[in-house]
Image: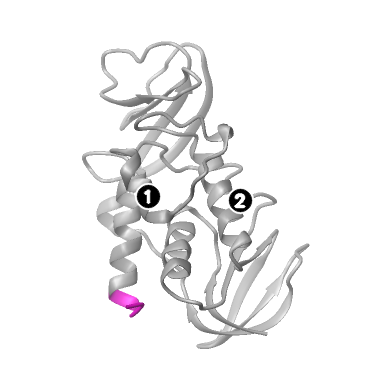
């Protein structure tokens, strides 16, 4: 089968880019993911500057599972919600999938996946994060207030905190840890991932 756009890994930036393409075109989209579930686990940041930034993706209504506040949400459920919206609007999604490119316009999908075998495509989006946004950042999801040395954090609607730092700081009552990426100044927030997706779109595709 031929697809207009193939994404070998359905990470946060690929999901955002796929949604941008879906909102601007009627092109076919195939999202592959090596894990059993999109967003589980995740390394992405759930902090954003304003709910207005999310309007660009046309994702409402938001499910309660996002625990969305004025500037933070559960990023694992955000990725899952993005995948559901994409699928409901015609995108193909296949988890537990491994992709091997065999030519500039073809490849083979293997694994315990719903879509397998040889495919062809017009665009393959194997997105690399720019080096300047590839610094390691440590995230803790916790219930206690962040210690004073943590300056990059947000409180979600379930009263949990998401804190990020360049060093692995111990925070009491932490129930989730992750290592994500960011610039020298901040982790890759939803705003930054959307900016990177838009830059990729502008550079690689003409969707106007």
* Earlier residue among tags 1 and 2: 2
Quarter of the rendering containing residue 90: bottom right
Q: Determine the secondary structure under disc 2.
A: loop
Left or right: residue 74 compared with residue 40? left
Q: Is residue 148 above or below residue 202?
A: above
Q: Which residues are magenta?
A: 203-208
Residue designated by label 1: 55
Q: Determine the secondary structure under disc 1.
A: helix
Which residue shows up at 54% across the image and 40% down it? 76
Which scheme is used to colour this image of the protein? one colour
In percent of width and height, residue 154 lies at 35, 26
Residue designated by label 2: 38
Q: Is residue 101 above or below residue 135?
A: below
Which residue shows up at 30% across the image and 49% down it? 192
Residue 35 magenta-highlighted? no
Residue that sits furthest to the left in the current view: 185
Which residue shows up at 61% across the image and 43% down it? 40
Which residue shows up at 25% across the image and 53% down it? 132
Quarter of the rendering containing residue 115: bottom right
In percent of width and height, residue 179 lies at 44, 38
Using a 10 Å C-alpha cutoff, classify the residue at mark 1 as few (fewer than 14 neighbours), some (14 to 19) or many (20 or more). few
Cα distance in 3D space between marks 1 and 2? 22 Å
User: Is the C terminus in the top left, top right, bottom left or bottom right quadrant?
Assistant: bottom left
Q: Is residue 168 above or below residue 116?
A: above
Left or right: residue 146 compared with residue 66? left
Q: Is residue 174 above or below residue 26?
A: above
Quarter of the rendering containing residue 24: bottom left
| Magenta stretch: helix, strand or loop mostly | loop
Asked if the residue under mark 2 is in contact with the one under mark 1, i.e. CB atoms within 8 Å, the reply is no
1 or 2: mark nearer the eye: 1
């Amino acid at each position: 089968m031929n697809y207009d756009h193939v994404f070998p890994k359905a990470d946060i930036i690929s999901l955002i880019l796929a949604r941008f393409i879906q909102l601007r075109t009627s092109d076919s989209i195939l999202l592959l993911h090596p894990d059993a579930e999109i967003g589980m686990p995740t390394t992405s940041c759930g902090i954003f500057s304003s709910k207005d930034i999310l309007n660009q993706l046309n994702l409402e209504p938001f499910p309660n599972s996002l625990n969305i506040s004025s500037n933070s949400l559960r990023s694992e459920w955000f990725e899952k919600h993005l995948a559901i919206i994409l699928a409901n609007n015609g995108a193909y999604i296949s988890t537990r999938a491994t992709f091997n490119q065999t030519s500039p316009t073809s490849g083979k999908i293997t694994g315990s996946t719903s879509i397998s075998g040889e495919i062809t495509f017009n665009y393959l989006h194997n997105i690399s994060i720019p080096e300047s946004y590839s610094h390691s950042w440590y995230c803790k999801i916790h219930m206690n207030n962040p210690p004073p040395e943590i300056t990059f954090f947000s409180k979600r609607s379930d009263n949990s905190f998401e804190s990020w730092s360049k060093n692995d700081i111990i925070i009491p009552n932490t129930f989730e840890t992750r290592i994500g990426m960011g610039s020298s100044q901040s982790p890759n927030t939803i705003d930054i991932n959307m900016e990177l997706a838009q830059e990729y779109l502008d550079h690689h595709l003409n969707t106007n």
